[in-house]
Amino acid sequence: MSKWRKLGDLVSYSGKGITPKYVDESSIIVLNQKCIRNHNIDYTLARYTDDTRSISQHKFLQTGDILVNSTGQGTAGRCAFVDKLPQDKKVITDSHILILRFQNHFEAKCLSYVIFSIEELVQTFMDGSTGQGELDKVRLFNLMTSLTENKLYQKQIAKVLSDLDAKIALNNQINAELEAMAKLIYDYWFVQFDFPDANGKPYKSSGGKMVYNEELKREVPEGWEVKKISSFAKTSSGGTPLRSKKEYYHNGNIPWINSGELNQPFIVSSQKFITKEGLNNSSAKVFKKGTILIAMYGATAGKVSFMDIEACTNQAICAIDTHSNLRVYLKLGLETLYDYLVTLSSGSARDNLSQDKIKELKFVIPNEKLLQQFDKFTKAPLNNILANLKQNQQLTSLRDWLLPMLMNGQVSVAAAEAMVNK
C-alpha cells in the first residue's frame, strides 16, 4: 500500500512568473490567469512580453510543470499541467500564477490531476478575509497524497487519465466544428440573406427581392418581419436563495445555474443545486429545457447559452422561452450581438444590460417554412453536440472516480484501461 506524502516534499521548485511588459509580438509568450481553465492552457488568451529584458531561466516553463492561479476572485486555485510547449516560442507566466516543478514528469502529471480534482478546496486556501488575497502556499504544500512512488505505475496511471482527457478533447473539437458549421449557415442564410430560394439557389445573390426596412436602416428579404424579442418570446430572470440559510442548499437536487456557467454555449448540467425550500423562499424559478440564457452582468455579460435541462438561474441571467423552431435561430442571432450586449452591460447602472433592454432587441423573422427548414438543418448537429457533452460528463465522472482508486491500488491499470476503452 502506498504511503502518504506531503505535496510540498515532492516539489523541486516553486515560484511565480514575472510582471510582464506587454508587446504586440516577441519570442516570449506570457500566460495570465484566464489562460488556466479545466486543467488546460488556453494560448488564445495569452499575450507577449518584451524579450529584450533579462529573465531568470528557471522562470521559463518546462514540460511537467503544474500551474496554479494564485490570485483573483473566481480564478484562484485553477490549475493546469504543462504537457507540451510551443516549439518556436518560450513561455512564461505573469506574477499571479504559481509554478510547481517536480523531478518526475509522470508523478507531476498524476499530482496535477489530484489538484484539479480538489480545485474547489484549493480555492479556499486564500490569505485575507475577502477571498481575493493570495493563495496560501503552505496549505497547498501540506496537502497529502498517497500516489505510489513506483515510476512505471505513475506513468501507467497518467496514461489512463490522459486517454480519458483525449476523448473529452476530441468531443470538444467535434463540437467546436459543429458549432462553427451552424454559425456559418446562420450567417449565410440570415445575415447575407443567401438562404435557398424556391429553386434551391442563394436568394440575394440570385436577385431575390429585397425591401428597405426603416427600423433596421437596411434591406431585408421581401415578406420578412422585424420583431422585438418581447413579441415572440417570454423573458424572465432568476434569483438567489439566502446564502445564510444552509437548508436552502444542503442536499439540494434542483439545478441552479449562475452567470459564470454561461461561458459554455450549451448547458447539460449545473455546478450547484438548491432545495425546494430555497426555491420557494426566493425569486428563483424553474425554467424548462430549451430555454435560452443571457448573462446580464458580471464577467460573462453578453454570453448566450442553450439550456438542455430544467434548471433555475441566479438574477444575473435573463431566461428566454420561445417556440422550438426559433430557439437555435435566436441563440445564434444573439451571439452575433455579443459586442453590442457587452457595451450595454459595461455602462452605468442605469445603462446596464437588463431584461427590459433584451426585450427591446429587434430580429428579422423569416417565414415559417424557412424557419422549419433551418431548424431541421441544425437539429442533427445540435443533438450531436448535446450527446458529446453528456458523454464528456460520463468520462469526467469516470476519471474523477478512477483517480483515487488507481492511486490507492483499489483498481488495477488493466481494469481501468478496459473501462476507458469500453
Image (spheres, rainbow, N blue to C red):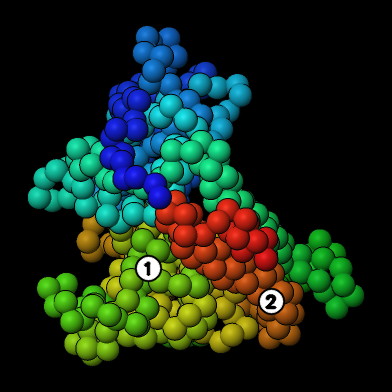
Q: Which mark is residue 271?
A: 1
Give the SS element for disc 1.
loop
Q: Residue at x 31, y 27 (%)?
A: 14
Horizontal side, residue 325 vs residue 306: left or right: right
Specify the amino acid type for callout 1. Gln
Give the farthest residue toward the front: 1
Q: Nearer the viewer, residue 330 or 123?
A: 123
Q: CA distance from mark 2 to mark 1?
A: 26 Å
Q: Residue at x 17, y 50 (%)?
A: 131
Q: Residues within 10 Å of mark 2 (few under 14, many from 20)?
A: some
Q: Is residue 223 visible?
A: no
Specify the amino acid type for callout 2. Lys
Give the answer, above or below, for where 47 lies relative to 215. above
According to the picture, the residue beneath numbered tag 2 turns out to be 379
Horizontal side, residue 256 vs residue 369: left or right: left
Give the SS element for disc 2.
helix
**Upstream in the sequence, badge 2 or badge 1?**
1
Q: Quadrant of residue 89?
A: top right
Q: Quadrant of residue 7?
A: top left
Q: Nearer the viewer, residue 219 or 252?
A: 252
